[in-house]
Image (tube, rainbow, N blue to C red):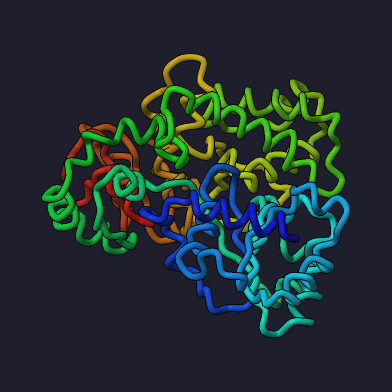
Amino acid sequence: MEKLKEKSDQLQLNTNVKFERYLSAQIDWTWRLNGILGARGTGKTTMMLQRLKREFGTSRLAIYISMDDMYFTGHSLTDFVELFRNKGGKYLFVDEVHKYKSWSTELKNIYDLYPDLHIVFSGSSIIDILRESADLSRRAVVYHMNGLSFREYLSFIGSENLKTYSIEDIVTNHTNIAAEIIQKINPLEFFSDYLMYGYYPYFIENKKVFFRRLEQTLNLIIEGDLNFIEGFDTKNIPKLKQLLYILSVNAPFKPNIVNLSAKTSINRNTLVEYIHYLEKAQVINAAFPAGISTSMLQKPEKIFLNNTSLAFMLAEDKPDKGNLRETFFISQLKASHNVKIPKSGDFEVDGKYLFEIGGKMKSGKQIKGNENAYIVADDVLTGSYNKIPLWLFGFLY
């Protein structure tokens, strides 16, 4: 117990609180049980340690623990909480919960047993709270963490006081919004760097080893996190890596499940299920046809890599620019919007807006005659009428 407290104090003392992720302002920290789910490397641990440092410092009232700590190979979470409570603890930050077998049951029981205890837990985005425990899902408020938006990236490198804008703001008032932002910074000066490095916060530490770290992160997701899915067969890890390679070199990819199944030797239902879990792990973005409901065993219309940093890491050559544009757009929109593939245009958003993505000379012939239809143009600082700069969609969160 004492060693865990020492680790917690040391970690929070070494945590920088200058920049906080967008999600921190959205969480109701007064709620007794909050969950933060997200992919590795997106900043979940840092956000919890920042909250701990700002509010409690080294006070005995609060502690950060990680469920992959050796301590929990010989002690239960329930026993630890009892010790923590006996020492006056009231605020518990629990990381990597998916690595502890009975986490959902014990958290539910701890929540019920100690009504004055506040708990924040984090884990992999593959976790399905409803499947883990319906009782826990009724008690916990769960938030989902995405990688850095373009706006956050600009803030991270020193451009502060940049606001977020709703999609309604952007489509109705994009010229004024762009003009306001341009007074503070030239977004195009930094956009290419964001596409390459900007999605994962650890780029700030050392760009030279960024892609090596990203590759390690991806391996940990496939070889580690996916193992916590019930029924996942570890023998299929090489096949899953082969599947990801095929998707990455062809993205955006319109999947032929029969051909993919033959290439990877994974049966159809398992293959579609793995595509679903790769998306939950925030490795890919699967987009389905507009106008129909979706299920886990339904084939996506198109598959994109989750973000442009992954595209640069996995591409054998420099990624196609059109691919990067569409990957960026869907990565920024899917954080809080429903994105589908329409019959005309590239993307339908929330069943309301139609977008065609392209370069600065992109015409609108593919979406002509459609209501609420817009051209999203790369390499332009400002737009006009229904032509909106691509970079501006990086200000949604």
Q: Residue at x 81, y 54 (%)?
A: 72
Q: Is residue 339 left or right of residue 192?
A: right
Residue 143 screen position, x and y as percent: 56, 63
Quarter of the image with the N terminus is bottom right
Residue 237, compared with residue 367, is above or below; it is above
Q: Is residue 329 left or right of residue 215?
A: left
| The image quarter in which residue 169 lies | bottom left
Outermost residue on the bottom side: it is: 115
In this view of the protein, which residue sits in the foreground, 74 or 338? 74
Count of numbered marks: 0
Residue 197 screen position, x and y as percent: 41, 32
Q: Is residue 225 left or right of residue 73?
A: left
Q: Is residue 141 in view from this perspective?
A: no
Residue 122 screen position, x and y as percent: 64, 58
In this view of the protein, which residue sits in the foreground, 137 or 323? 137
Residue 79, compared with residue 152, is above or below; it is below
Quarter of the image with the C terminus is bottom left
Residue 222, compared with residue 338, is above or below; it is above
Q: Residue at x 57, y 47 (%)?
A: 288
| The image quarter in which residue 123 lies | bottom right
In this view of the protein, which residue sits in the foreground, 153 or 274? 153
Q: Is residue 87 in view from this perspective?
A: yes
Q: Residue at x 64, y 28 (%)?
A: 244
Residue 393, compared with residue 206, is above or below; it is below
| The image quarter in which residue 357 lies | top left
